[in-house]
Amino acid sequence: MNATSAAPVVVVVDGYSNSGAYVGEFARLGVEALHVQSTAEFMAKMVPPDLSGYRETLVCAGPDAVDATVERLRAHAPVAVLAGQEPGVPLADLLSERLGLATNGTAKSPARRDKFTMIETVRAAGLHCAEQFLGSDPEAAADWARGHGRYPVVVKPRSSSSSDNVYVCRSEAEVAEAARAVLAGITMYDQRNTDVLVQSYLDGTEYIVDTVSADGQHTVCGVWRYDKKLLPSGRPVYDLDVLQDPDAPHVRALIDYVLKVLDSLGIAHGPGHAEVIMTASGPALVEIGARLNGNMNPAHHEEFSGTNPARLAALAYARPAEFTARYGATVYPKRNEAVVHNVATRRSGRVTEVDQAVLDKIAALPTVREVVVRRPAGSDLVPTVDLMTSPMRVFHSGASHAEILADHQVVEQLAEDAFRLA
């Protein structure tokens, strides 16, 4: 883009995943985007962002680079700074605060990234949540589980996402083994795990609640039920995200709870992506990110609601008064059924070719709206253990859930044949 353009600009920090949609959505409002990268190199476990639509890219790798980055950004007079995806949240909080822009601020920034601090902050606000332990010793983690006295328990990293290294454990031995695996691992964001988090198991159905906010006024963009598979190892694998009826009583309870979570964590501006379990005692937070749902497909979202979270967030940052007037305190409509299918595989090997004929068969199914291949030729296919190792994502919409499930079964049968391996 033209670096001398007089158009107003926004700053997107770490524009991974579907946050590339921000470039087009801000452009609709006459706003151009700058990109700030919080690491010297792109994160190895994440698909690199497409930088072609940004006016300029800056690298702010570490605290020593912050002052210079602030001054370079100040010269552009940005109207907003926002996180593209999870790793950019702390830096977006810091830069927006330093530049005097609409900001969620740095005071509670750790609580929006660190899962232990997050849950303790929510608990302090009087909201239902898991009991938990944080430590660096696998035996201490096992001791806490024994003292907790109820299995299963959940063992996971302190800071990651997409079910990365999440284990459901049913004994002290399993807890210690899972803790050692976490401590030996690297997060999605190329950080070594120095602590392990153990939490009480929240028994119930898990849901997504997606929101966008401006000046503390929230709109709910979508509520989805997670349908998961549990591997023999105890690790949950995402299968389907199923759109919920916004008027259903359980959805209303989830929404009421998540709005309180947003306020407790200081998420007053921009998107929120919450994962909540509906337990017998009511909703309980698993975690929340101050960023877009990584499974959000703009066109798919627009089909059932008439808009999408990236568009809403762009409006919230660029024209907050218009956003609050049109969308403040609203909940999405549901015009049709919608499902996101995260395809799993048991195969492994180097992908030599993706069979377009198979993809065409999947795309031709009546409810399929888009097929996203996440393991192109030249990449490694591995057995699915979490969201990041799902090789394909399929977006469905239709008049009935039964119609979607019928196509889902066909996709399950076809998908493995899409990848030719060495």
Image: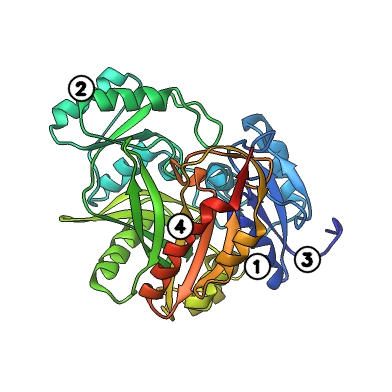
Q: Which residue is mark 4?
A: 412
Q: Nearer the viewer, mark 1 or mark 3?
A: 1
When the figure is inspected, residue 368 is found, relative to residue 44, above or below; the finding is: below
Q: Which residue is mark 3?
A: 7
The type of residue carrying mark 2 is Asp
How many neighbours does mark 2 have within 10 angstroms: few (below 14), some (14-19), or many (20 or more)? some
Image mark for residue 25: 1
Cα gap from disc 1 to disc 3, whole angstroms: 14 Å
Does residue 139 appear left or right of residue 185 in this picture?
left
Cα gap from disc 3 to disc 2, whole angstroms: 58 Å
When the figure is inspected, residue 115 is found, relative to residue 368, above or below; the finding is: above
Cα gap from disc 3 to disc 4, whole angstroms: 47 Å
Q: Residue at x 75, y 47 (%)?
A: 57
How many neighbours does mark 3 have within 10 angstroms: few (below 14), some (14-19), or many (20 or more)? few
Q: Residue at x 84, y 62 (%)?
A: 5
Badge 2 vs badge 1, beta-carbon distance below 8 Å: no
Q: Nearer the viewer, residue 293 or 419?
A: 419
Q: Residue at x 71, y 66 (%)?
A: 31
